[in-house]
Amino acid sequence: MPSLWTRIIHGTFSQFPHQFLKMERHILDKVCIMSSCLFLCLIMWTVPAEGYFIRNCTVHGSLNYTDRLKVLCYKMSFHQVPSDIPHNTKVLDISINYISQLKEGNFKNLTNLSILNISKNHIGFLEEGVFKDLMSLYEMNLAHNALREISGGMFKGLNNLTELNLGYNHIKSIEPSTFQILSNLRVVNLSFNALFDIEQIREVLKHFRLREIYVGGNNFSDFSTEKISNLSLNVQVLDLSYNPFRYLKITSDIFPNLIVLDLSYSGSKNGFQWEVKNTSFVSGVKRLFLNGTHVSYSQMQSILRSFSNILEELYLNKLQSQTMQDYLNVTCLVLPKLKVLSLQNNKFISLQKKQLEYCRQLEEIDLSKNKLQNMSKTLFQGLNRLGFLNISYNNLTAVPNATQNITSLQTFDLSYNMIKHLENYDFMNLTNLRYLNLAGNVITLITGSLFSNLFNLQVLKLGSNLILSIQGPLSPSLGKLEVLELRINKLSSIKNSTFLYLNSLKELNLIDNQISSLEEGSFLGLQRLKALLLGSNKLTRDTFRKTDVFTGVTGLNELQFFDNYLSYESTDKLSYPPFLSLKFLNRLTINSQGHNGLLNFPSNLLEGLTSLKELHAGNLNINELHPDTFSYTPMLSFLDLSKNVLSTIDSRVFRMVSSLTEFILSQSRLESLDFLIRANLTKLKVLRGKRNELNTINETLIRSLPLLKYLDLQQNPFTCDCDNAWFVNWSLSNPHTQVIYFNKFRCGYPPNLKDMTLESMRTDSCVVNINLICFISSTTLVTVTLVVSFIYHFLRWHLIYGYYLILAFLYDKKHRFQNKEKMICYEYDAFISYNTKDEPWVLRELVPHLEDTEGWKLCLHHRDFEPGKPIIDNIVESIYKSRKTICIISRNYLESEWCSREIQLASFRLFDEKKDILILLFLEDIPTSKLSPYYRMRKMVKKKTYLKWPENDKGTRVFWHKLNVALNAEEGYKKDPYINDLNEN
Ligand SMILES: *[C@@H]1O[C@H](CO)[C@@H](O)[C@H](O)[C@H]1NC(C)=O
Ligand SMILES: *[C@@H]1O[C@H](CO)[C@@H](O)[C@H](O)[C@H]1NC(C)=O
């Protein structure tokens, strides 16, 4: 019924806007201030404050403390230095990115930065003053970039810089003054650049604080002290390796402090010319590198002679043009103080007797990575100081007998040869040996008597062999052994008392064997054992069925049991919990890497582990956790349950683990983390839930983890709608928890936003919602109050009027419905609407004529209205009970509200029933101007039948006839030309 409402609005409220504007000004002002205030609040809400979050970086350390903030942004496709680095960062790593220039402001305010790594970018340009705020910077790595020159004030402000790495750039020129700014510089690396003249580094070398300079891999062809200085320098380490020197001339005493000289891979195929005017000019050099040089025998002689009386360490690895073998002895003769000789990678096949005859002073010799098959029995005779011998990565098939009598030997590396048997070798005289490495050979058997007399052995490595069994208890002489490594072998069982005498053993590594049974008492005697590593074997629950295999090792701190075949049919309590006696155990790994896994986690599997702090229980193929699972481990602080199909976890599981600080739940098909809300993990600092099915993270969850520092939820299918709005804003702006790589989180839902990042989701509309509700409700309240008081003041009557209209409308609807049900049957022929002032006319003229003469039944309010009933109800009812409504219009009538209402109500019926029920009867002439406020009546007059009471008696006959016709008419629409002029306006 649209036009009804149109009418109400038009009729009743048409003046509203006008009136509203006239409303008192200050009230309006108040409303405006309130609303703009609310909007301001909204804006402040959505602008993120400075938070922990830096796009693509991880932050280690706390924002709250000023010390040690480490920001790692390496390998993250940055094209620019990230701008949001916290000002208290101490270490910043932005290496391996695509940054091509550094501009002023890039490191603004990082006054606490002490280590900066920007290596492996594409930096070709450094704006002057870019580092000017970095007053605490100690170490800077700019290696592997595209710098071409060092010039101007590019290092301005780096007053504390001590180490500068500019290696692997394309530096061709260095402006002398550039390094002078760096007043604290001690170490400079300029290796592998495009420098070509030693004069270019003159100013660097002359830097009074400089101690180490690395200029290997440039294009220097001549080195002459004349070109550098005539004053002595402070340099201690000089690396000139990988330069195509034609000659090196040291003609003055400018290196009195030089200790280390590296000439590796220098010179051409013909070596280089070496000239030292006076051996005292290099008399401080203790360590010399000549690896990979092409120098001939005579050149070598002349070089070594210069260092004759002082050199202690000589590195001759991978020599190119000669077999060093032939003059090993001469070398030792020339260098009587030599202690360390490195001869790696020289293709030696065998070493003859007396080749080390003059090397008696040697303490360390490295012969690794050669092709040695044998060596003379007496090779090491007389080398009474030899403590270190490395013959790993050779082709030896047995431990060389030549080594049997090196009684001074402490470290002996025989790894990665082809040694099969140890039986023929006598370790008897190696009583000083502390470290023996036999890993990577083809040993198959270990017997108890093998290592007798190794009273001082601390570390024995036998990993990566083919050991099938260990026979008998290992030698009682291994009483000082602390580490025994047997990993990657073929052991299938451990026999009773195998380690009985290893009373000092701290770590036993049996990882990656085929062990399926541990005999009772396997670990007997290992009373000091701290770490037992049994991972990747074939142990099953039967291992623990009968007896306690851990007898004797109850002091164990760490047990690695990952990747075995431990499994259970149910979570029911075990009668023999396997770890019952390990009350000092801190760390337990029972995770699996692809076998069956536990299948079920017995509720008391961890019984006895009262000290357990760290549990790795990932990938166990378990689906649920019994609420009692961790009730035996009150100290638990690290728990990894990743890769189990858990879906959810009973909160009761965490009753006893209130100390938990790190919890890993990655890849567990979790759909929600809400179980943590009631877990009471108030000490949790790290929570990792990568690759689950998480959709939303809510505020309650986060609030239940008050100490959370790192939250890793990468690769979850987040819902990108307002449910996550709080999480998004919190991740971006909270200053306590770092949501690791939050900017990489993607939407999994809704489908049209799939693969969009969660970060790019618009949350302002969500935030507005909350505020908008407040805003709207308060505004509405204000407006309603204003409008109501306004209406009360100015439009009271319109309001009452509107109310009655609505009542009529409802009555109308009701009746219409009823009328449709049954045939209409009227009580009256006409309802007469008139003003009491016109009553005399009605009673004198109308009633007698219509009722008495014509026989119509009329409804008159003074006569027919039901007493006691509200007047409006009476009107409405009367209208509906009558076939027609006759309005007696006079000036009085128009002035009465009730009368005009009667017209209106009747007009509803007219409208509803689409019948002409209204008869307008004008008692007097009413000018258009008088009628015009009665908008509705005017409209009706325009298209309705109406009659006029004639002024003289002549017309009364016609009048009564017309009225009679009108009362008779069913659908009367007759236009009387007589009144037409009234319509024109
Ligand atoms: C963050 O890393 C991703 C890819 O790892 C990259 O596409 C994005 O541009 C990086 N963001 C910034 C700000 O560098
Ligand atoms: C051990 O040293 C002793 C005394 O020097 C010597 O007699 C013995 O032959 C040596 N043993 C081996 C196996 O070389």
Image (cartoon, rainbow, N blue to C red):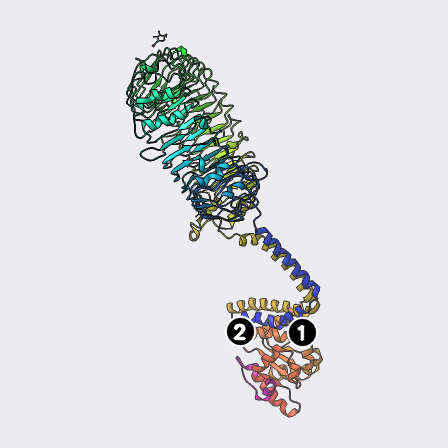
Q: Position of residue 179 (x, y in %)?
A: 51, 41
Determine the image quadrant of residue 949: bottom right
Q: Residue at x 46, y 39 (%)?
A: 201
Quarter of the rendered image showing ligand 2: top left
- Tell me if mark 1 has few (under 14), some (14-19) or many (20+) residues whose alpha carbon lies within 10 angstroms of its own: some
Bounds of the magenta segment:
966-985
Q: Gap in Å between the C-alphas at discs 1 and 2?
A: 23 Å
**Amino acid bearing label 1:** Trp
Say whether residue 397 is visible: no
Q: State the quadrant of the N terminus.
A: bottom right
Residue, disc 2: 913
Instruction: Residue at the far bottom: name it.
Output: 954
- Tag 2: Cα neighbours inside 10 Å, few (<14), some, or many (≥20)? few
The residue lying toward the viewer, choosing from 394 and 307, is 307
Q: Amino acid at mark 2?
A: Glu
Instruction: Tell me the element at label 1.
Output: helix
Foreground pick, 242 / 405:
242
Q: Residue at x 58, y 68 (%)?
A: 809
> Mark 1 or mark 2: which comes first in sequence?
1
Between 840 and 197, the residue placed more toward the observer is: 197
Query: On the rendered structure, is 338 left or right of 653?
Result: left
- The stretch drawn in magenta includes residue 597: no
